[in-house]
Image (cartoon, grey):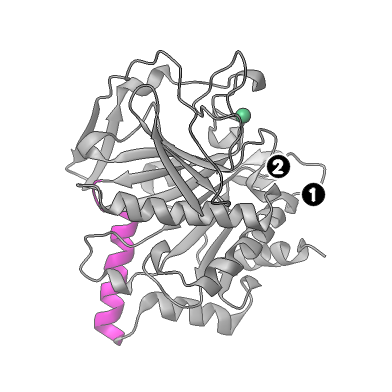
Amino acid sequence: MKKTPTRLADGRELIYYDSADAVVRDAVDPRPLEPVATTTEIRFDRLLGDSVAIASHRQGRTYHPPADQCPLCPSREGWQTEIPAADYEVVVFENRFPSLTGDKGRCEVVCFTSDHDASFASLTPDAARLVLDAWTDRTRELSQLPGIVQVYPFENRGEEIGVTLGHPHGQIYGYPFVTPRTALMLRSLAEHRATTGRNLFDDVLADERADGSRIVLAGEHWTAFVPYAAHWPYEVHLYPNRRVPDLLGLDEDARAEFPHIYLELLRRFDRIFGDDQPPTPYISGWHQAPFTAADRREFALHLELFTIRRTSGKLKFLAGSESGMGVFVNDVPPEAAALRLREVATP
Ligand SMILES: [Zn+2]
C-alpha cells in the first residue's frame, strides 16, 4: 500500500491510499475554499452521564446533490470535487462539515472507490482489502492525535439511514471520550472477569460457536453470528477468532481473509428481502478498544452490521420504547434472522 498525504485548499488533510507504489499523486486543489468556521460544543448530560456534540455549522452541508455534482467523485474538467485527482482508489479526508472538531475529536470521510455507482458489496476483494488497510492506518494515525480516545470507522448505507451522498463512502469518528456503548462493554467485561476469571468476549464467541444456531458464516479466521439478544431485525457481529483490541492487532492471515467474509456478508444483506427489493440499508461499524482503557488488551475488536429494514418496504423505527426508554423490541427472532442469512448464501 502506498500512502500520499496532501492538503485541500482550506487546509484540511487528504490522504490517498493506493495499491501500487508507482502511483504519483500531485494534483493540487484549485478551489477558492475558505475554511468552514467550525464550532463543536460537547455538552455533558448530567442525568444520563453521556455527552452530546452540538455542531450548528452542519446545517449548511451538501444534501442529495445530483450525480453529476457529486463532491466525492474524482475531479474533471469543469467540476472540482473534494478529491483533486482525476481518479483514485481509496481516499480519506477531513470532513468539511464535521460533528467533532479540533480538540473535541475528528471526523473523516473515506471514499471506498472512485466509481459513483458502486457499493462496498460490489468491490473486489483487493479493493476491500485496501479499505481495511486504510481503516487500520487511520486508527494508528488518529491514536497519535492529542485528545482522541476512541476511533470508530463506520458506513451508513442507504437514504433510509439518512445518507445524503450516494457515492460509496464511510466515515471515521475520532472521539475525545469513551463512547457510552463501549463503556457498557468495558463494565460487563470487568464484571465477568471479576466473577469468572475469564474474558467475556472469548466466552461469547465460544458459546456462539458451540451453539451454532445463530452462526451466519464461519471462516478460518473470522466468525459472524447474530447475537443472542439482537437489538435489530437483522444484525450480525463479526469477530476475528483470535482476539485483538483493535485493527492494528490483526495479523496477515486475518487481514487476508476479511474481504471475502465481509463482502459475502454484505451481499447476503442485499438478498435478505428478495431480489426485487432496493439495496438493503445498513449501518456497519468497527468497535475498537479505547486508547485510554486500562484493560484495553481485554477488549475484542469486532464489527457490528445491522439493517433498520424489518420486512419488505417496512423500516424499524426507534419509537417510544426504544427512543424513550432504550428498550428495543425486535420482531425477528435472532435464530430466524441467522437462518435467513444462511439461506441467502452465495451459491
Ligand atoms: Zn460520486
Q: Nearer the viewer, mark 2 or mark 1?
A: 2
Q: Does dot 1 land on a helix, a strand or a loop?
A: loop
Q: Amino acid at mark 2?
A: Pro
Residue toward you, 186 or 112: 112
Q: Amino acid at mark 1?
A: Gly
State left or right for residue 167 relative to residue 268.
left
Q: Residue at x 58, y 16 (%)?
A: 79
Question: What's drawn in magenta, residue-wise?
Answer: 176-196
Does the rendering let one see residue 225? no
Q: Residue at x 71, y 38 (%)?
A: 313
Quarter of the rendering containing residue 157: top right
How much space separates mark 2 and mark 1, taking CA atoms? 10 Å
- Residue denoted by label 2: 279
Q: Pointer 2: residues within 10 angstroms few (<14), some, or many (20+)?
A: some
- Residue denoted by label 1: 274
Q: Residue at x 31, y 78 (%)?
A: 192
Q: Where is residue 97 shown, x and y percent of the image?
A: 38, 26
Q: Residue at x 54, y 51 (%)?
A: 21
Above or below 256: residue 47: above
Residue toward you, 161 or 243: 243
Mark 1: C-beta under 8 Å from nearest atom of ligand 1:
no
Magenta stretch holds residue 337: no
